[in-house]
Amino acid sequence: MTKQASASTYEITCRLPRSRASVPRARAMLHAVLSDWGADQDVLDNAELLLSELVTNALRVRVPSDRQVGVRIARSLEDGLLRLEVSDAGSGRPEVQAPGDDEPGGRGLLLVEALAHRWGVDERVGGLGKTVWAELKAPDIVAEPVAREVAAVMVRPGQRVRVRGEWRVVVSVRGEQRDAGNPAVVLGLDEGPALRVQATEPLAVRQGEDS
């Protein structure tokens, strides 16, 4: 997964295998990102539905073997929009259908059209396939500083770590030896119980909000 930030946008991109498991993986990633950005529940719910439909549609497209699905989540501070993009290597362009009451499928893009502020399809620059995108109005969410992953032993007091989906300030750090000589780190947090993890376990870290 790649994270990029600038003065006006913040984005996260990743590539997912062509597997049904990629739909919940994309949804979980989106949930984590929008939680960090402070999105309200309506934006979160609609964005999850949109991304699920876009990834599901991309997985149904026939493509050359081993081609992955690309996902991009971007926040535009200037426009107050959340943009979701899903790219695949397949040909053709998706079109909104009008299935009958007795037809079980074909309603994915109807949902996208109903939920999105706007949506569309772009050809991929310099490559096969296309990118289907959808935008939601999200004026209240704020892009956070870029987080990074470090080994638990590298965490320092004053930093913030992601614990059970929430960011907590580290107030103390101490090492200890577990059974069989496995080194561990105990992080005292501003709220809740201390976090005890293996010294080499990766943790998502960013600087404190006042730093």
Image (cartoon, rainbow, N blue to C red):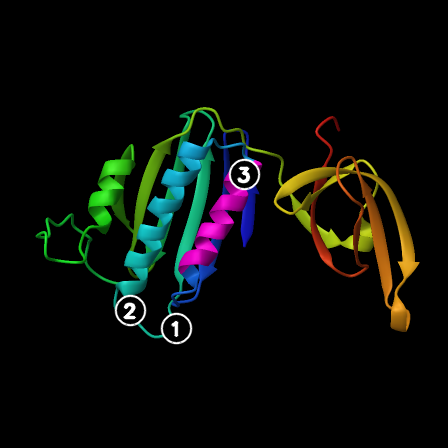
User: Which quadrant holds residue 206?
Assistant: top right
Residue occupying the point 32% across, 44% down: 133
Q: Which residue matches tag 1? A: 66
CB within 8 Å, label 1 to label 3: no
Label 3 sits on residue: 35
Marker disc for residue 44: none
Left or right: 127, with 169 as reference point: left
Q: Do callouts 2 and 3 mark residues in contact (Cβ within 8 Å)?
A: no
Magenta segment: 23-36
Q: Within the magenta stretch, is there residue 196?
A: no
Residue under the image location 46 percent in, 59 percent down: 15
Q: Earlier in the sequence, mark 1 or mark 3?
A: 3
Quarter of the image holding residue 46? top left
Residue 15 visible in the current orientation = yes
> Could you tell me how many numbered marks the image carries?
3
Residue type at mark 3: give it: Ser
Q: Residue at x 32, y 41 (%)?
A: 134
* Residue 43 position in % (x across, y down): 41, 34
Indicate the secondary structure of the residue bearing disc 1: loop
Q: In what element is the residue under mark 3?
A: helix
Which residue position holds label 2?
A: 63
Q: Is residue 27 magenta?
A: yes
The residue tagged with tag 2: helix, strand or loop? loop
Percent x, y of residue 36: 57, 38
Mark 2–mark 1 CB contact (< 8 Å): no
Q: Quadrant of the N terminus?
A: bottom right
Assign the magenta stretch its main secondary structure: helix
Residue at 71% across, 56% down: 202
- Residue extending farthest to the left is 100
From this view, report whether residue 124 is shown above or below residue 145.
below
